[in-house]
Image (tube, rainbow, N blue to C red):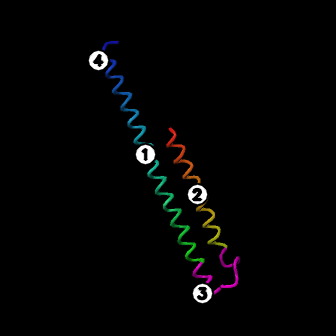
Amino acid sequence: MDFIEKVGNVISEKGREAVDKTRILAEIMSLKSQIATCQEVIKKNYLEIGKLYYEEYRDVEDAPFEKQREAITNARKGEEELQAKIEELKRM
């Protein structure tokens, strides 16, 4: 291999690495955005629970809050899964 061919190969490889890193960073940003959405769902549903609790159901803990409890549980699971993906991508 001559010098110019070697330089071309190095440039091509570095270009592929840069594209891969850019793709990973874009995916991380997307996952972080999804985490923020999960956190917003949690916050919204906590507020709904609190409002219901103080306005109507001060002494009842389970029945009226099943929907919000389930939404918070699902959002937390989603947040954990997305965070795990971010950590996996960072190790690449």
Residue at (46% x, 47% y) in the render: 27
Question: Distance between the Cα atoms at labels 4 and 2?
Answer: 49 Å
Assess disc 2: are there few (<14), some (14-19) or many (≥20) residues with their C-alpha within 10 Å of its C-alpha: some
Where disc 2 sits, the SS reads helix
Question: Distance between the Cα atoms at labels 3 and 4?
Answer: 76 Å
Where disc 1 sits, the SS reads helix
Residue 9 relative to residue 72: left or right? left
Q: In the rendered structure, which disc, 3 or 4, sits on the residue that comes first in sequence?
A: 4
Q: Position of residue 14 (x, y in %)?
A: 37, 30
Direction top: furthest residue: 1
Q: Position of residue 10 (x, y in %)?
A: 35, 24
> Are discs 3 and 2 less than 8 Å apart at CB?
no
Q: Is residue 52 magenta?
A: yes
Q: Which mark is residue 46?
A: none
Residue at (31% x, 12% y) in the render: 2
Q: In the rendered structure, which disc, 1 or 2, sits on the residue that comes first in sequence?
A: 1
Question: Distance between the Cα atoms at labels 3 and 2?
Answer: 30 Å
Q: Position of residue 4 (x, y in %)?
A: 29, 17
Where disc 4 sits, the SS reads helix
Q: Amino acid at mark 4?
A: Ile
Assess disc 1: are there few (<14), some (14-19) or many (≥20) residues with their C-alpha within 10 Å of its C-alpha: some
Mark 4 sits on what residue?
Answer: 4
Count the marks: 4
Q: Which mark is residue 25?
A: 1
> Are discs 1 and 3 less than 8 Å apart at CB?
no
Q: Amino acid at mark 2?
A: Gly
Write down the region rendered in magenta.
50-65
Q: Amino acid at mark 3?
A: Glu
Direction bottom: furthest residue: 56
Mark 2 sits on what residue?
Answer: 78
